[in-house]
Image (cartoon, rainbow, N blue to C red):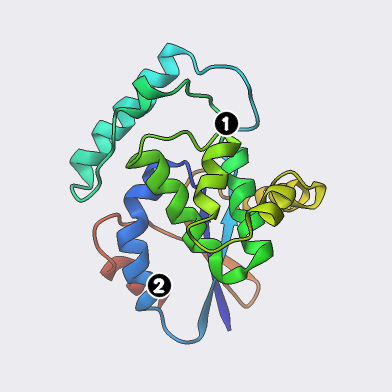
Amino acid sequence: MSTLYYVHDPMCSWCWAFRPTLTKLLAALPSHIKVQYLVGGLAPDSDEPMDETTQAMIQKHWHTIEKKVPTTKFNFDFWTNNTPRRSTYPACRAVLAAKAQDAGKEDAMIFAIQQAYYFQAKNPSNDDTLIHCAKPIGLDTKQFQQDLHAKHTQQQLEHDIQQAQNMGVHSFPSLILEDNGQFKPIAIDYNHTGNMLQQLS
């Protein structure tokens, strides 16, 4: 068996843009390739409001993505409805807490966070948003809250980040194919699966 690692952050806008094509890619994978997700941890914990320069930079990224990946849409109300923070570790831990409770809920949690952020203009840097995401996908919210702040969840986050860095990953999303102990980066195509499937063969 080979392993395809998908390194992401649930609050990474390019990961949101990649989601539809990634879904098609994973559905078309050869049976000998298993898939493992790693959270890459885009921005560490912070209670500081995001400065205006960073806000402008991220909004510019959103506009760029909408042009380059036309199926991707963002709700720009996020920037007026919230006090944004440059902090994605809480959302990463939420994905790991969901996975710890039920491995089958990992991707559902990622999607719930993305929808809250990009469609509903809610802030996934906040616990209440993450708890709001956990309930509709069938998680035990009490257990989820405990796991969200548990020491073992933070340790797993640090482990994922270190594993991604050891594979040479420094941007998100990233695809890395491990085959016979060798790690091969797969060039991301946001709009088509063909080139990626070719690299994976």
Foreground pick, 145 / 158: 145
Residue wearing tag 2? 26
Crowdedness of circle 2 by 10 Å Cα count: few (<14), some, many (20+)? some
Along the line of sight, which residue is nearer the eye, 39 or 132?
A: 132
**Residue 16 location (% of width, % of height):** 37, 48
For discs 2 and 1, the disc positioned in front in the rendered view: 1
Specify few, some or many for label 1: CA neighbours under 10 Å numbering under 14, 14-19, or 20 or more. many
Q: In this view, does 82 lie above or below 33?
A: above
In the image, what residue occupies the spot 68% across and 48% down?
A: 145
The x, y position of residue 102, in whole percent, is: 63, 68
User: Does 10 appear above or below 49?
Assistant: below
At a point 35% along the width and 20% down the height, the residue shown is 80
Residue position for label 1 = 87
Taking the image as shown, residue 62 lies to the left or right of residue 147, namely: left
Judging from the image, what secondary structure is the residue with disc 2 in?
helix
Q: Give the amino acid type for the residue marked by disc 1 in the picture.
A: Ser
Q: Is residue 25 left or right of residue 12?
A: left
Name, please, the residue furthest toward the top.
Answer: 52
Q: Which mark is residue 21?
A: none
Q: Is residue 146 above or below residue 106?
A: above
Q: Residue 3: which quarter of the image?
A: bottom right
Labels in figure, total = 2
Q: Residue at x 61, y 59 (%)?
A: 98
Residue 65 in view in this figure: yes
